Image (spheres, helix red, strand yellow):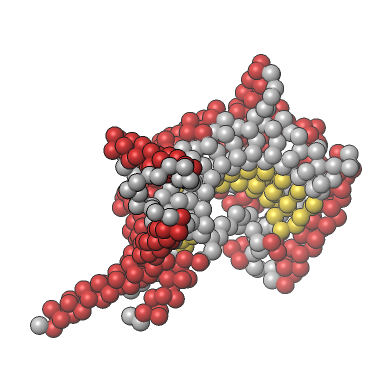
Amino acid sequence: MNLSLHVSLLVSLVVQSLHCNASGHSLSNTFLINQSYKHHKNINEIAQTIKYEMVESFLKKTNTKRQKEIDVNEEMDKENDDVERLLSVDVSFSFIKDEGIEKVLDTLLSCDESDEPRCIPMSLDASMNHITPKGVSKLFNRLVQLAEKRVMDSNDTENYTTANPENNVTKSIEIEQLEKHTTNSSHVEIDTDEKLKSEKRHHIYMESINISLNDIGLHGVDTVHKTSETASFMKSIKKLIENESGLACPSILRIDNCGLGPPSCRSIGKGLINCENHILEKERNNPSSFKRLQQRRLEELYMSGNPISDEGATALAAALKVTSRTQNLPVIHTLDISSCHVGDVGAEALAYAIAGNPGCVKSLDLSNNRITDRGAKALGKALILSYKKLKDPMESLFLSNNDDIGDDGAASLFEAIESGALKCLSLRSCSIRADGASALGKTLAKLISQTKNKNISDISIDMSGNKLGTHVTKKKKGYSAYLDSMNSISQKGFGLFKSGLKDFVDFGGSSLESDDEAEEEDDCLKENEKHQISTKCGAILLYDSFVESIEATEDKEKDVENSGIR
């Protein structure tokens, strides 16, 4: 292969950006009701604005659009219909407090004026609103209760239509809409009494909830009050995530910087385990409802900035390890526990879960923690072992700003990329130096050699912010290191002492007869230091190892070809 092609691909692999898609809805298919930074308004004004915009803009425009589509093609297949529009409500930084979040939810549930039964996906951003654990508990419990009522209503409707075959056209309308997130009024005929009609009014379901930057952990509150408040929160978040009804849990939950500790992680872990148990039970009892339950589950969890430490990370890892995976879906797709005081113990626990339950998590963010080479090596080995079992690579692993991850940890992670176990790796601003750059060069060369067998265009490696131009020599340990340090200190001390008294005392036998000679020796040492650094320059080592590996691979290929000809 042409060397210029190798170098261009090398550059593209190193500088390729990392992308994370947080939602399945495009911006063009999202309707935003923006009431953020409205702290100068009272909650009643905010609620009235939300109701007006939802009724006058969102619902009417959506209904008009639907009717036009039906008029153009009345026999349009449901599979080709547009995805339901996402309603995004943003009340962040408005200081609405506990009463406000309850008022907002009541408003969203009460402002439908259409007779068409459908389900509306919604995103709620209530970050930075002085909401307490009590307010969050009420929000989560309300969502669980609404979902349970929805299932009961659906069962009542099914019983009614079973007893009245002429009205069977209305059977399981809501379930079909939740499965496809689409509706077509040409397929919806409600010819029942007013009771059934009211039961099929639209329902919102939470696609995403963001309650970040609310002091749910209650820093500084007295112990008794804090215990009762947080206990209520932990119980409610467990019920929300375990999702017994199958309709309550949001796909995305953001609880960044909320002061949460290890007990919250244990509640979340129990919720994940119970959720899968409910799904398996439903599958055994009623296989037709299994697909619907699969859609309403927690897929992305963001907990950045919470002091969960190794204990909390271990609790989450235990849930990932023991939770069964149904239909090859991950236990949770995205887990963000960056800036959470997680060290090597937590990283090793997560590595154990990844190796023991392959595919349990697809994207893991451990940036800005306290992980060293030990934790990074454990993760690298676990990824390789997981891939050997399942052949399902992890999509992304973020370990940026872990200051103690160096060359050894990076090399282990590069091996995971070589094996195909990892697609995207971020090691920004760690302590990777020249030897790590050399390992990267070898990895890139091996990836180049694999292009004939598989596509590597989606591989991304980010090492920006590392001091690749330096080489760190291993420090001596034990008594020899102590002797060297004491010798260095004594030499420096004697040098200072000698320079301070050189005008009064003649120190015979000195190798430095004058200040000029001392300066000349310093210059000589600097030149030697520069020479040593240049021979261990990370950029040069990366390039050399890359080219050498490519040449070695091509030589092997030529040898194979020659042996075949013979």
Residue at horizontal 76 percent and vertical 45 percent from the top = 92
Would residue 325 be found to the left or right of residue 70 on screen? left
In the displayed structure, would residue 443 be above or below residue 308? below
Above or below, 77 against 176 in this view is: below
Compared to 505, does 456 lie above or below? below
Residue 243 visible here: no
For image coordinates 80% across by 52% down, the residue present is 34
Give the total of numbered labels.
Answer: 0
Q: Position of residue 241 (x, y in %)?
A: 57, 37
On screen, residue 510 versus residue 563, left or right, reads: right
Q: Nearer the viewer, residue 19 or 527?
A: 527
The quarter of the image holding the N terminus is: bottom left
Q: Position of residue 560 (x, y in %)?
A: 17, 76
Q: Nearer the viewer, residue 459 or 544?
A: 544
Whether residue 535 is situated above or below residue 218 in the rendered picture: below
Q: Quadrant of residue 108?
A: top right
Q: Is residue 251 left or right of residue 362?
A: right
Front residue of 435/321: it is: 435
The one of 185 and 402 positioned closer to us in this rendering: 402
Residue 145 position, x and y percent, is: 67, 33
- Measured as percent of width and height from the top left, residue 264 is found at 57, 30
